Amino acid sequence: MSTAPRSRAEARRRSDKARRPQGGRKRSWPRRIIYTMLALFVAGVVGVGIAYAMTDVPAPNQVATAQTSVIYYADGKNEIGRISDYNRESVPLKQVPIHVQRALLAAEDRNFYENNGISPTGIARAVWVAVKGGAATQGGSTITQQYVKNYFLSQDRTLSRKAREILISVKIDGQQSKDQILENYLNTIYYGRGAYGIQTASKAYFGKDVSKITPAEGAFLASAIRGPSFYDPRLGPSQTKNAQTRSSYILDAMVKEGWLTPQQRAAATFPKSFVKYTPPSVGGTNGYLVQLVKDELIKKVKVSEGDISSDGLRIVTTIDKAKQTAAGEAIKERIPKGAKNLHVGLASIKPGDGAVQALYGGEDYAKNQFNTATDATMQAGSVFKVFTLIAALQSGDLSIRNSFDGNSPQYFEEFANPGGATDFNRRGGVRNFNDRDYGRITVPEATANSVNTVYAQLNILATPAKTAAAAKQAGITTKLNPNYANVLGSDSVKVIDMANAYATLAAKGMRATPYFVKSVKSVDGSFDYKAEPKTTRAFPADLVSDVVYSMEQVIKNGSGDYAGERLNREAAGKTGTSSDNYSAWFDGFTPQLATAVGMFQGDGSIKKENQMDNVPGWGAITGGTIPVRIWTDYMRAATEGMEKLKFPDPAYINKNAAPKKTQQPQQTSEPSRTQAPQPSNTPQPTTPSTTAPPSPQPSDTPKPTKTKTPKPTVPIPTLPGPTSSPADPGTG
């Protein structure tokens, strides 16, 4: 039977079938896809053409008339302050030296004079990032695009705005000369220090007309536009280094492009001097809040300095107006009238959330921009003992039921300091405040009375490294130097860090990241930000319950009983005083609010005139004096109306960690070294020969019997330590 095809169509079908793998389907889909893609391409071209035709170049969005940004308290109604940092003076391009122009091109757009106003590859990168969930405006901006964004458009971060930016950039590039675009850009871009435009920036940084700017100064100005807060040398060594690195990169690029000779590059060294600049700011205590908010907007919310000062943002903070007022009043009331050089920092944080509810960084930001709550670091004194307690409990070899020898002095090999100034230091001596003997006492009792000899034993049990690690886990961000004296507060810490670390304990071991900005909106609705608290589990809740119970005793019947007699709600805390009274602390919390108060004198450095041992109108300042009074006054007002919540009962973890008896050290004219506890299955603290059995579970820790002197009011600096300034003498 004949199998010849009956028609050409049938022949084609047979031919196609022969080419297809057996069982496969007809391979007509590539052609369909090609037709579809071609149709989409044509439609896209037509659409872009229509969009281009319909996109008008808008009237310039004059930065000079931009709206002021307003910062509000947490209620969103009462103002903390307003930000208006605008300053601009336009100049013709011919007034800008060619090397200054080329420095900008080297930094931002080396193909400026060749491109059509946009960078296709850069746009593709930006769109790809946006599709993946990144910022829609990331990457790819030519100078023309940046000019359009700053001069014609709002700063919202949407693909639609990016699309308008691209279309307008192409139109502008066709309507204006490259020199005109560059001139407009140079006169509108933000350089920091409130300066919009190259002329104003030249005066703000170097105090001279732009026509006199050198290649090195031009490279610096080109660096500054990338992020003024990261490149302004007045802000610190880190910013100086950033500016030097970026300027060097720009100058090298100018050589590569043939815009500078190697000889000119060698002569273009980083500027040695800059004009002194004091930013316009809100005065008084609120000025510190305004600056903290600006810093957080730039670093965390990713809003530029230019946007902050000109985009009409409405910024709601976490700061509670009533609490902020209470903080200022408490400090003003308690600082002695005759004391001219005392400084106080206060920070108050919501546990488990991180919202900063109140912060006192100084009396007047307009006069002094140094923030005593976030910039200053002070020796921690005994407020650091809490971290040793945490570390000892983490080891599994301590129960707060354990009792320890609390007599004074005691000698520990681990505390020996070969370079110590006295024989007591060199031999590892540790003594309690006023050499007070406490006998055998429990951990809560030792915490209540800040007993150095007991806590020295706990740090030997825990190890200094674990104490430092616990501090970091809790929320301390400063550099720590683990040594046995760190239990006594030899490390320096910030007030806001101590508030946050104690807030971690108030939140049952959940650490939060402190923040100041609750929400941000632009007046045109193009930008809308809401903060989300960031928390993480730092410590187990049962361990924290034992730590908090021990700290409650400080306020109930210990060195912080001033607060306990007046607060009328459950609270826990710790006093602290550094050696020679260079710093004094009271830090504490209720279940809903954690607050730290730190004090120092002068510039806080370790020199005699900064000792707070003879303050006019008061005398010696320790943690149990002015700091606890400020803390109490503030917390009484701040917690008014709050529900009176209770802390969890202590869990008494590590129930089998019972201390062993040891030989009593020989009492001779030259005391022997006390054997430190050895963490095997249980801790092994030093005890008298007539050792009492482990204390039963306490319900309310009693005060120890006073064996030598009454409770002291003036500290005696005695503690050793391998630091330049040994820490807390145990004054509370």
Image: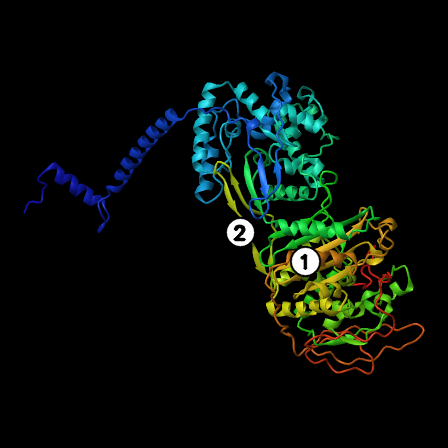
Secondary-structure class at tag 1: helix
Front-lying residue, 387 or 529: 529
From the viewer's perspective, is residue 587 above or below residue 229? below
Front-lying residue, 177 or 579: 579
From the viewer's perspective, is residue 7 above or below residue 152? below
Disc 1 marks which amino acid?
Met
Residue 635, numbered circle = 1
Q: Position of residue 579 (x, y in %)?
A: 83, 58
Do we see residue 610 in this rendering?
yes
Do we see residue 472 in this rendering?
no
Name the residue that disc number 2 marks: 532
Q: Quadrant of residue 591?
A: bottom right
Q: Quadrant of the C terminus?
A: bottom right
Q: Position of residue 601 (x, y in %)?
A: 81, 49
Q: Residue furthest top?
A: 94
From the viewer's perspective, is residue 682 above or below residue 191? below
Label 1 or label 2, whichever lies nearer to me, is 1
Q: Position of residue 473 (x, y in %)?
A: 64, 59
Q: Badge 1: how crowded within 10 Å, few (<14), some, or many (20+)?
A: many
Cα distance, mark 1 to mark 2? 26 Å
Residue at x 66% of width, y 79% of height: 656
From the viewer's perspective, is residue 216 above or below residue 702? above
Disc 2 marks which amino acid?
Glu
Secondary-structure class at tag 2: loop
Mark 1 vs 2, N-terminal side: 2
